[in-house]
Image: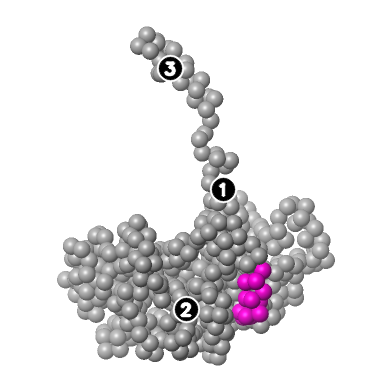
Amino acid sequence: MSRFSLYSTAAEVSEFRRCNEKSRGKILTMQSMNPVVRAIENAVLGPTVEKAGGIERELRRGIKKQFDEVIRANIGDAHAVGQQPITFLRQVVALCTYPDLLDNPSFPNDAKSRAMRILQSCGGKSLGSYSASQGVSCILEDVAQYIIRRDGGIPADPDNIYLTTGASDGIISILKILVSGEGQSRTGFMIPIPQFPLYSAAISELDATQVNYYLDEENCWAVDVKELRRALYKGREYCNPKVLCVINPGNPTGQVHSRRCIEEVIHFAFEEGLFLLADEVYQDNIYPGNCKFHSFKKVLYEMGPEYSSNVELASFHSASKGFVSECGYRGGYMEVLNLQADVKAQLIKMLSVRLCPPLLGQAAMDVVVNPPKPEEESHQQFMREKEAVLSSLALKAKLTEELLNQVPGIQCNPLQGAMYAFPRILIPDKARQQAEDLQVAPDMFYCMKLLKETGVCVVPGSGFGQKEGTYHFRMTILPAEDKLKTLLQKVKDFHIKFLAEYS
């Protein structure tokens, strides 16, 4: 029955609404919101980054600091710190976006042919249309050909490939379809520690169970099968571990796994009946001459049909990293092997709910996997730009490792790949006690103090996970060489002062 009748006055209605609004409060509060969302953490954009933004605003208002600028080394966003885009990629995407430019003589013919091929596969010959849920057909074919070339002729089927909104979209999709069970039968995901926070956040959001295995810091962050087995058996006490995630090259740790290590991981997954996730988004970022990238798919096939026909594997790549580093386009792909046909249909159904990944990102990904050929006019410039980016990163990787290892109380493993250093730092007892008094992790205390005193923004290792009693921070090697040298000198001076202050 309605609260009001035809005889209620406007004043009565107004007074009731005023009182109701005053007493009702907000429907969505911290207490009423989804608790799994509340539990999500993202160290890469956490408290130190928020504080860095506040300091930047203060500097713009003319508030004096001990430094003139904040140097951001918290996130792998190469273009944000000055990396120039690859010309050919931007030309192809521009032509796809505005086809009228196809008549412009300023654009090379190979870029035009790429753009026309992509547009022919789009509805209405426009990037403004939807594509199939798996992606634009000709780009799926190009990804398959790229995988075949990369892996020395091992076959790849476009039907096993899915274009994604960055690699993260694909990773979350696979995690989502793998989650099942209740209580001790709930799906457990084995993830490396240190790990990229996407994994812990997604596992938390899906209300699944995280099973940590520790990388071997003393052995350049290698995967140790004994540690995998320890983590698996421990995990089986409280969940059903059925997924093993490996990040190669590593983030935040920067290691490149050897072929033998990958073989051992695959054999372990085969023995224990685990679904393998291979995060390979940094596969182009390999630096020392004695390191080589081996894809999990290639090693799986080379181990023979017993493995290649049975081990379920999802591997991921992205346009956000490598030498193009086009983070904003959100382009990526995943290749998924050995799925049952009916499960594959369910995966496609799930992906169809989001219709399709952005076509701009798909076009960007196409250039990554289908670059100019040696006989084409853009090839020389493309290779020159690619080599410039990768050689600069290799130089900065070596520079970072060498300079950090000159600092008393800092140890940094070789940076074999990816875009990051994850040095171990000594934090004296006195500093740890002060951090405890402030109710923050010791490495958060360290990183926040580093930011406030030097303007250098890095991320505490506790946001990625680390062995108890050890402390680290993650920093990118992306800033320009002179800026990186300044950053490393600031870290050195700060750390020496920090040890003196708290020893």
Label 2 sits on residue? 311
Disc on the earlier residue, 1 or 2: 1
Local crowd size for mark 1, using a 10 Å CA cut-off: few (<14), some (14–19), many (≥20): few
Tell me what residue is drawn at x 69 percent, y 80 percent.
Answer: 218
Local crowd size for mark 2, using a 10 Å CA cut-off: few (<14), some (14–19), many (≥20): many
Give x and y (percent) for residue 138: 26, 74
Disc on the earlier residue, 2 or 3: 3
Identify which residue, 479 or 257, lies in the foreground.
257
Q: Quadrant of residue 321?
A: bottom left
Identify which residue, 328 or 184, lies in the foreground.
184
- Secondary structure under the numbered disc 3 in the rendered image: loop
Real-space Cα distance between discs 2 and 3?
A: 64 Å
Tell me what residue is drawn at x 42 percent, y 82 percent.
Answer: 309
Give x and y (percent) for residue 432: 77, 61
Q: What's the amino acid at mark 1?
A: Pro
Decide if residue 154 is on the left or right side of residue 57: left
Give x and y (percent) for residue 472: 67, 69
Identify which residue, 21 or 73, lies in the foreground.
21
Tell me what residue is drawn at x 70 percent, y 59 percent.
Answer: 441
Query: Which numbered marker is on residue 70?
Result: none
Label 1 sits on residue? 35
**Range of the magenta residues?**
222-234
Q: What's the amino acid at mark 2?
A: Val
Label 3 sits on residue? 3
Tell me what residue is drawn at x 66 percent, y 82 percent.
Answer: 219
Q: What's the amino acid at mark 3?
A: Arg
- Secondary structure under the numbered disc 2 in the rendered image: loop
Real-space Cα distance between discs 1 and 3?
A: 35 Å
Q: Nearer the viewer, mark 2 or mark 3?
A: 2
Decide if residue 161 is on the left or right side of residue 243: left
Local crowd size for mark 3, using a 10 Å CA cut-off: few (<14), some (14–19), many (≥20): few
